[in-house]
Amino acid sequence: MLLGSLYLSQFMPFWFLYQALPVFMRQKGLSLEAISVLPLLSLPITLKFLWSPLIDRYGFTRWGHYRFWIICFQLLIACITAVSAWLDVERNFNALLVCMTIICLSSASQDIATDALAVGLLEPHERGLGNAVQSAGGSLGAAIGGGGMLVLLNYWGWTASLQILAVMMFVALIPLFWHQEQVKNKQVALDSVTNEQYTNLTDRVSTSSTSATKSITNRSTTFLFPISYLKTFINFCTSPGIGNWLLLLLLYSASSSMAATMFRPLLVDIGLSLADIGWLMGIVNTVAAILGGITAGFLIAPWGRKRSLTIFSLLWAMSIAAYLLPAFGVTSLSALYLVVIGTEFAGGMIGTTTFTIMMDKARPESPGTDYTIQTSVGVFGSIAGAALSGVLAQATGYRGVFAISLAIAIISVLMISKFFNFKSQPKG
């Protein structure tokens, strides 16, 4: 309930900005130049790892370390959304852009805290189902924030639709208000400072008379030294096996994004109506992804990490190959439904599995930073895959793009069998 509501509310504003807002702006007559600015709002999602150590280091234990951050950021998102409801899209575009930027920054920051809270909340044997909930919440959030908001905008207009979105953000916080986070006195990475520096610093903190200083958790102390900030990233990225794992995440994301990006224009070229495309890529794909994620959530615990990742990756590679069917002329509606269901179901399975392993690899002293580094690598891969897909399609056609995507998927599967044993990872 808690994780589902948090991930649902986390994804709603992002997909509203990514899917619904550009369509609404164009309908209102705004220029393509103005609309082209909107993708820049996704930069905080990509670069959020840069300030993730701040959220790991600083917090107020009275509210719960990560619970404090989530409440603050989500309340800010809801308030800014409510303010935006009263702005005219055409007349107040600059003010609206400022509001949307604040929402994106807050949403990206909330994501760091939510993932860190989930890492500490879920025991290793619970992470499969926990990440299935995350995947389902993310898919529903995307459906509501994207297609759902377009429907509301069409029938109720800008002001009422954004007010409803703001209310949903407030309501989604209710389970968190009842949650009592167990704040642990975690050991920080003391190798980033000398013993003398640390002793002097802790002495100053302990003798301080201000209540504000005392309320800050001891995780903030080492962050005062710039070298510790850099070592937070370096220590994680140089951990055994992390380099290969990050490369796998990059390849997986690039392959999926490359194929999915070109599949949509292929549907248009085939001659499908907007209604058929909307139903296929808005409803059917969401349901399939949710079911795939839930199925994987139940299987990860009994099968173990490596077996699950290997089997689901093979299914995912086979689903990428299915994109070649419509590219070679198999364009019946039933065949397209099977392609979408297969790819999204397999994508949901591999997504839940990778999220679970990402949690396993996050260190207890810096879960937000470690998990965010991994998700940021995935985002980089998705952006690169999407950017290259158009260039490759222009040069090689749809068949060439899907073939290259399949080749990358096969390389990813081979990497799993060669480089990953997960002997140190929990089975459940």
Image (cartoon, rainbow, N blue to C red):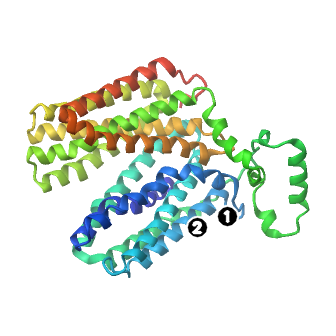
Residue 100: % across, % down: 43, 68
Residue on which the image places disc 2 = 72
Q: Of 424 and 107, which appears nearest the observer?
A: 107
Q: Give the residue drawn at x 75%, y 57%.
A: 217
Q: Give the residue drawn at x 36%, y 62%.
A: 38
Mark seen at residue 288: none
| Residue that lies at the very extreme toward the top in this rendered image | 418
In this rendering, does residue 360 appear at all? Answer: yes
In this rendering, does residue 7 appear at all? Answer: no
Crowd class of label 2 (few under 14; some 14 to 19; many from 20; radius 10 Å): few
User: Is 222 left or right of 59, judged from the image as shown?
Assistant: right
Residue 350: % across, % down: 39, 35
Q: Would you place residue 346 above or below residue 111 in this image?
A: above
User: Is 243 left or right of 409, judged from the image as shown?
Assistant: right
Q: Of 18 and 8, which appears nearest the observer?
A: 18
The kind of residue tagged 1 is Trp
Residue 233: % across, % down: 63, 41
Q: Would you place residue 222 above or below residue 212 in this image?
A: above
The kind of residue tagged 2 is Cys
Residue 91 location, quadrant? bottom left
Point out the frontmost of discs 1 and 2.
Answer: 2
Mark seen at residue 63: 1
Going from N to C along the chain, the mark reached first, 1 or 2, is 1
SS at mark 2 in the image: helix
Residue 296: % across, % down: 40, 36
Q: Of 128 and 370, which appears nearest the observer?
A: 370
Residue 333 location, quadrant? top left
SS at mark 1 in the image: loop
